[in-house]
Amino acid sequence: MKKTNQVILLIGIVICLISFFVDERYSLPLINFKGSDMKITLISVGCSLIASSIITFFLLSETNKNYEVVDKWGLINIYKKRSDMNLSCDRHMKNLRNELDMICFGLRNFRDAVGNDIEKKVEKGLKVRILTLKPDSMFVEQREIDEGSSNGEIKKTLIDLIKWVEKLKNIAPNKKNIQIKFYDTMPLFSYQRIDNYIYLGPYLYGLTSQKTISFEYVKNRDGYKYYKDYFERVWKDNNFCSESKN
């Protein structure tokens, strides 16, 4: 597109230059087309091409800038609701082979949807790391209020998650492949790293996690690296999280 625009600009300049060499006294008798009319026509066409190419140049510059930002950060999709994001997650989950990292609450919907598939992959060596809130944390109670959930609802999903993780450990070829850690502070964003893709989104007041905006990033871009590095940092920070749920 950029090269095409350059060609159009060049053609416009050439046409304008040609107009300067047109003899205004010259005319085409058969069609009564005077040299002066030809000169005006050439100038009009040439200037129009030049003007359109200049406008297109600025539009392309802005478009390219936006594209470069998106490409640099590897943002490949934005989902209005996390439930919409699940379609993409499920697609990449089928090809999941190596690592699954998550920052989450109880993963109730996740376990219901793909729990059996994850268990099969764990049996084949899939590594899973989960970072979640302590079930008895005051922040769990506050999140239940923020979401409008019933008292103890999120806490129960966390307890069920712990039981599920124990099941994964029992079927894994190496128990170290399955790890869960707990923190006790304001909830972090929802985070999933499915091998080469990262999905994340905020926890918003008055909305359940499935109704919040979510983002998808691809590997080898700044966004993927930024959030992966962040997960690694908090995962290894013993002042932030530990294997104790109490």
Image: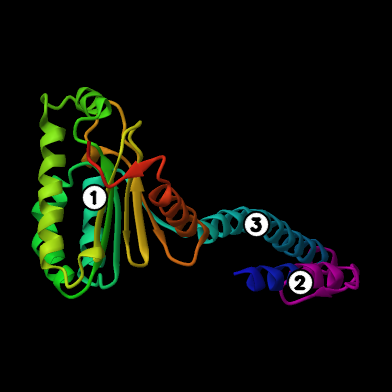
Measured as percent of width and height from the top left, residue 5 is found at 66, 68
Amino acid type, label 1: Asp
> Mark 3 or mark 1, which is nearer the start of the sequence?
3
| Residue 84 tag number | 1
Q: What are the residue bounds of the magenta stretch? A: 12-38
Residue 68: quarter of image: bottom right
The numbered mark, 3 or 2, whose residue comes first in the sequence reads 2
In the drawing, what numbered circle is on residue 108?
Answer: none
C-alpha distance separating marks 3 and 2: 18 Å
Vertical comparison of 21 with 132: above or below: below
Q: Residues at badges 3 and 2 in contact (C-beta under 8 Å)? A: no
Q: Quadrant of the C terminus?
A: top left
Q: Residues within 10 Å of mark 1 (few under 14, many from 20)?
A: some
Q: Is residue 44 left or right of residue 74?
A: right
Q: Nearer the viewer, residue 140 or 63?
A: 140
Report the residue marked by disc 3: 61
The residue tagged 2 is 10
